[in-house]
Structure formats: C-alpha cells, structure tokens
Amino acid sequence: MIYLDYAATSWPKPPEVLKAMVDFLERAGGNPGRSGHRLSIAAGRVINEAREAAAECFGSGDPLRVIFTPNVTYALNVGLQALLQPGDRVVTTGIEHNSVMRPLRELAKTGLDLVVAPCDPTGGIDLDALRRLVTPGTRLVVANHASNVVGTILPAADIAAISHHAGALFMLDAAQTAGVLPIDLKTLDVDLFAFTGHKGLHGPPGTGGLILGERVDVDAMRPVFAGGTGSRSEREQQPEILPDKFEVGTPNGVGIAGLAAGIRHVMAHGIAAIRSDEMALTAQLCAGLTTIPGVQIYGPGSPAARTATVSVTLAGKSVSEVGWRLDDEFEILTRVGLHCSPATHRTIGTFPEGTVRLAPGLATTPAEIDATLRALSAIARG
Ligand SMILES: Cc1ncc(COP(=O)(O)O)c(C=O)c1O
C-alpha cells in the first residue's frame, strides 16, 4: 500500500507516539491539575512537557500561551470567537479551508465585516491587493500558511507586516505546515498560531492547539467555553490565567502525550531535513506528472513555493474514478473532491468537481512516487 494522504492526516504514526500514549494510560492516568496524588501529578507533568515541546518547536517564548484543543478547527474557532465582535473587519484569503471560512461566515451573519482577498489560479496572494483591503482599523487578518489543495505557501511574514501596519492582528492556519516547514513565530511575527497535531506533527487525532503571541491582549478576549480547570476552584467565573482561560474540562492527556512524542520525533529528525526531502519528492512527482498525457497539475511550479501536496486532474476521467482506481487497482491512497475548501477550488478553477490530491510525506519513498506515476500513466491510457 502507498499512502499519499498526508494532507488529510499522517500515517503511519512513529512508534514513539504509540508508546507515549500507552505509557500515559499505564503510568500517568490521573486527572491533571485536579487531584494532588501521584498519578494526577504525573499526568500534569506530561501535559506541561508537551506545552514546552510545542513552544520550542514553533519558537514561542511562553509555554503557558500554548492552548491545547482537539484539532486546528477548534483552535481557529476559539481564537475567532474569543477575539471578534460584531462590526469588526476581518480579511481572509481565497484559499482558506472551511475551518476558517465557515466560522467567519457564521460570524458575518451577526455583523462581522468579512472581506476575502483574492488569490491567483496557483493559489498565490497579491500582496498589493491585500494591502489595499487591510484598511486601518481592521481587527484581524486570517490566512492559511499553505493550501491544503495545491500546497501553495503564503508569505506569512509579509502578511503579518501588512496586518500590523494597519493595526490588525494576524492569525495563521498552520494545519498544513506545522512539522513540515521550519517555523519560528518570532520571525514570522504571528499573533495567533493555530496548528493541528495529527498531520505533520505526527500526533494522534484529537490534538491541536492555539499559540497566542505577545501582541494579543488576553484580558480583552472572551472565554469561548467555560468550565472546570482545576485552578481557582473557589470562583464561579472562568479563571483569567493562561492556558486555563481557554482550556476547560479534562484534557485529552493520552492524545497530548502522543502529540508531544510526535513533536519530539519531527524535531529529532529535523524539520529542515523533512522539508528538503519533501521538496525532492515534489520535484520528482511534478516532473513525472508533466510527462503523462492529459494530466493537469495545479499550484506553483517551483517546489520551493509549495508543500508536497499536489493536485491534478486527468483529461476525460472523473476525479472519483481516478481516486477509486488508484486505491482499488494499485493500492495507492489519495483524496479526491473539494478537500473541505470550495474557496480554493473556485480560485484554481476546479469547482465543483475538484481534483485528485497526491500528498506524500515523511515516510514516502522515491520508489513509491515512481510507482504512483506508473499507475497514473496506466489510468490515463485507459
Ligand atoms: C488548511 C487546513 N485548515 C484546517 C484543517 C482542519 O484540520 P482539523 O480537521 O485537524 O481541524 C485542515 C485539514 O484538512 C487544513 O488542511
């Protein structure tokens, strides 16, 4: 079997991740921050270490500003709902995932002034157009770090500078880049950084987080959910301290233990090395695809401008037929359709049919890319 669906979730997970999860359940199974006994303290330690690992991985100075969530969708929703008020102006882009678009469209129903900055057919953003749309007084700019459909990497540091120049905060959806591109939050100057644990960080499903930068005034944010934290139990109001203001209820300790092991795994491997291997796989894949008659590749031409996520269509074949035949005849696992991002497919001109998405990752080999190219050639021929 050849797994080319890393953009949906990474598989297989590193053995350390499985071990960390079993260890947590066996040795640290108490409720963290609640009871005072050894199993509770052990669980709390695992979660604190995970917070430190996430802060270190992304260059955030303060682990307490790492808020764990069940995935990036929750992280984005928490950031948006905690920050935004009716009447606020928010600018986003034409290549966002529905986990950004849908919450923003919901907020627009209650008076949010939502503007979508157009992207070009390769998924790239016109920074001059963006600059014109991010008018003074804009509250927030939200952008994808890399498209989950065509892999296009957006210039996060430039978007941050444009946002800050207008007095806006900048939120980055790093679902496709955490663990895949080297990221330093101080250099990128991101204010709200949302990541998921189960893709490039190789953690289990049910993990993710939001990292708040120093520019974010936490006191001015609403707690989106309220409930037990184990802290300030004498009060009936949500504690203002971080991360408790935004982390309520018993955390997914077993998942967070696995996430920490995944983060340590990618850091030990070296994210720069992962990036360079994935660029080589992308170059091999795209070069081979251009030789197959009828294949159209979407997204930027240069591997440096994109992640390893490559979308294609085959002339005369529906994407569902191609995806089904890749799986059924060749045991190659891809994802077809709209990839939860109708905005991107409108931008690149593939709405409503969508594309076949080939998304190699950490464990993909050059031989697997060759086998995929042979399979696509065979499908293209008949
Ligand atoms: C760019 C982008 N944003 C958000 C998400 C949502 O991720 P999750 O399901 O982990 O919340 C994805 C996942 O496909 C994504 O690719």
Image (tube, rainbow, N blue to C red):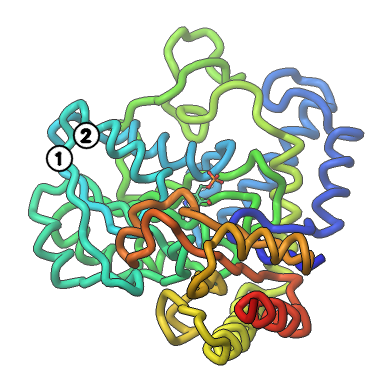
Q: Where is residue 9 shown, x and y percent of the image?
A: 65, 54
Q: In this view, does 332 lie to the left or right of 192?
A: right
Which secondary structure lies at badge 1?
strand
Q: Residue 108 carries which label?
A: 2
Question: What amino acid type should be assigned to the residue bearing mark 1?
Answer: Asp
The quadrant in which residue 133 appears is: bottom left
Nearer to us in this view, 186 or 78: 78
Q: Which residue lies furthest to the front in this view?
A: 382
In the rendered image, the vertical position of residue 108 relative to residue 369, given as above or below:
above
Residue 235 percent location from the top left of the image: 47, 9
Q: Are marks 2 and 1 in contact (CB under 8 Å)?
A: yes
Residue 130 in sight: yes
Q: Is residue 213 visible?
A: no
Give the residue at x 28% y 57%: 93
Q: Is residue 273 above or below residue 109?
A: below
Q: What element carries label 2?
A: helix
Cα gap from disc 2 to disc 1, whole angstroms: 6 Å
Label 1 residue near ligand 1, CB within 8 Å:
no
Residue type at numbered disc 2: Ala
